[in-house]
Amino acid sequence: MKRALLLNAINPRIGGVLVRGKKGTAKSTAVRSLAALLPQVPVMPGCPYSCQPGSPQDVCQWCQQAGRTNTPSRRQVRIVDLPVGATEDRLVGSLDIEQAIKSGEKNFEPGLIASAHRGILYIDEVNLLNDHLVDVLLDAAAMGRNYVEREGISVSHDAEFMLVGTMNPEEGDLRPQLLDRFGLAVEVDGVFEPAERREVVRRRMAFESSPFDFMDNWAEAEQAERERLLSSQRLLADVVVPDEILELITDICAEYQVDGLRGDIVMYKTASTIAAYEGRTVVDVEDVREAALMALLHRQRRQPFQQPHLVTEQLDNMLEDFQNQQRDREPSGEDNSNNDDPGDSDSDREPDPPEDQPEDPAESSLGDEWFEIGDPYAVQNLQVQPPDRRARRSSGRRATTVSGTSAGRYVGARVPEGAASDLALDATLRAAAPHQQSRRDAAVSDAAALLIEPWDVREKVRETHTGSLILFVVDASGSMGAQRRMVAVKGAVMSLLLDAYQRRDRVGLIAFRGTGAEVLLPPTGSVEMAQWCLQEMPTGGRTPLARALYLAMETLETERLKDRDVLPLLVLLSDGRANVTLAGEQSSNVLTLPDEVRQMGETVAAARIPAVVVDTEQDFIKLELARNIADAMSARYIKLDDLAAQSLADAVRRELPGERLVDDLTPA
């Protein structure tokens, strides 16, 4: 991680760094510490664009006016934080349309991209940022300029910054198209030896007890690293990449089936920067290997639910073959320049057991079974509409909703409730046009060509897409093991997870068995984690159905408190034979539906939570208790016998918010 950050500091044209890792792995600490390590930059005091002294930008009125008499100064490289909830106007900047109409001047209010010029733009949890904002950021980082086009006015300014994004893979991944736009990507795991942990704690306590003394102790080491970075920047222009090294780079990208040519270019730049950092002017094989580990991790072709993982054995074999070919071309004689044998590495060790391997059933609870996931299926593309027209800020691809941000398609205008954040120029002009004559007659002095009052202002109404929250409540009791019903149920859930992955829905998973229910996966955007939990879910024990419904209601209510824009869907898969009470006591009566289960179902209906009940009962004598649960929940009822994989997906979609209305309008 530190290596990738330093390489981008030397050569910002690499394209930024994406740091993937779980919480507590010092991702943010490493990024923030980089700014203090970099050399100070000359700026004009008060300039909002961080213009280079002596070459002000056309859009920068400060440098053109007040900046002419100011003396340049030096300051530390700026780190600009981009909040996850930032709007497009705050990011790229906005125009004062009223001032432009009255005076004819382009009064541009710069955004965060302008502040990050010649600095670092840091995005924590970049995977939670709206996709359209990530697109804008990556375009600006790639082109070195920020373009703002709106209301017939064009503004652009320099935007040369180092883009650093951090993310927790458990919260969902970025789209492959966006991943490819980051120059380098690294994985951090935060696994430390006890001695390293003790050293971290000692340094932290030393810093808190005396921050200035701590910084003085490391000032010499920081200055040495700072001088090394400056020397590397000067040496970078003299670095040469031999033709055979370029051939090796392109062969590696072709072997790993990297789409496009961005991977080749990034590897070329990264290998050159590594050589400069090491004080060399010629790129060698080891530079290419290190560059490949950081440039190809996120660019390999992979299927949904497949985590990014670079197969280093394949890379080592290609590098070894290349070195052998180079030795064959050299004059005869022993070549002792490379005594390292790739075969002496981790391949000779006994492999560790995979972490995701399920525990041995013999060592687990008596009677538990593990079933594989049935074959998934393709899901048809169906639009789902939310039950209201309230503006939502969440992103996704399933439902069409009114946008709560400046992103989306312009479909209308309205009177703003506060300050207009997304001005609708055409609607504003139409509102002001009928009053121009009377306002001009009442004007005491020469009036502008167009007189606009605050009550004329209109803001845009936009439509965008949002996702849903699908909460699966799966019966994992012993009865689900009969006739391998769990295989079909897991296959159906897996199919919906694939659909959720494509539409960027959030998913959650609750399993109930024994004497209680458990949230195997809290609602999250990481469908990969849901797939893993589904694979590892055991089957066996009794059926605490009432407890499962209570936990589902509790989970959805918590999500509603966190996000009032959530569109939930409850999917219950069970035979309905509840034999454990809400208090955890066992019951032998499975022929009728317990009152507390019925009451919990009525609670779900009263909360107006869309639901689907899938009856997994397949016995010769059918009690159809799941039908009674569906009636109590006002949910759609489906029998397992009628469940082809496509049938379950269609049933769930029909019960998503707004889909019932679509069905009612569809001709029979």
Image (spheres, helix red, strand yellow):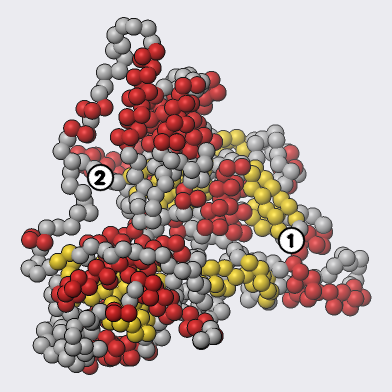
Tell me where residue 539 appears, x and y as whole percent. 17, 70
Split into 4 quadrants, where in the image is the N terminus? top left
Task: Note whether residue 31 is visible.
Answer: no
Residue 284 horizontal side relative to residue 58, left or right: left
Circle number at residue 308: none
Residue 532 point in image, percent of width and height: 28, 59
- 618 or 494: nearer the viewer: 618
Location of residue 375 by image quarter: bottom left
Q: Using the image, determine if residue 446 lies above or below residue 637.
A: above
- Please give left or right for residue 109 compared with residue 626 in the image: right
Q: Position of residue 4 (x, y in %)?
A: 42, 37
Q: Which residue is mark 1?
A: 151
Quadrant of residue 300 within the rendered picture: top left
Disc 1, SS: loop
The mark total stands at: 2
- Residue located at (71% from left, 41% from top): 57
In-front residue for pair 477/553: 477
Mark positioned earlier in the residue sequence (1 or 2): 1
Residue located 74% across and 39% down the image: 68
535 is higher (above) or lower (below) than 385:
above
Badge 1: few (under 14), some or many (20 or more) residues near its Cα, within 10 Å? few
Q: Residue at x 37, y 19 (%)?
A: 325
**Which residue type does callout 1 highlight?**
Glu
Which of 396/33 is in front?
Answer: 396
Q: CA distance from mark 1 to mark 2?
A: 52 Å
Q: Is residue 317 visible?
A: yes
Provide the residue designation for mark 2: 191
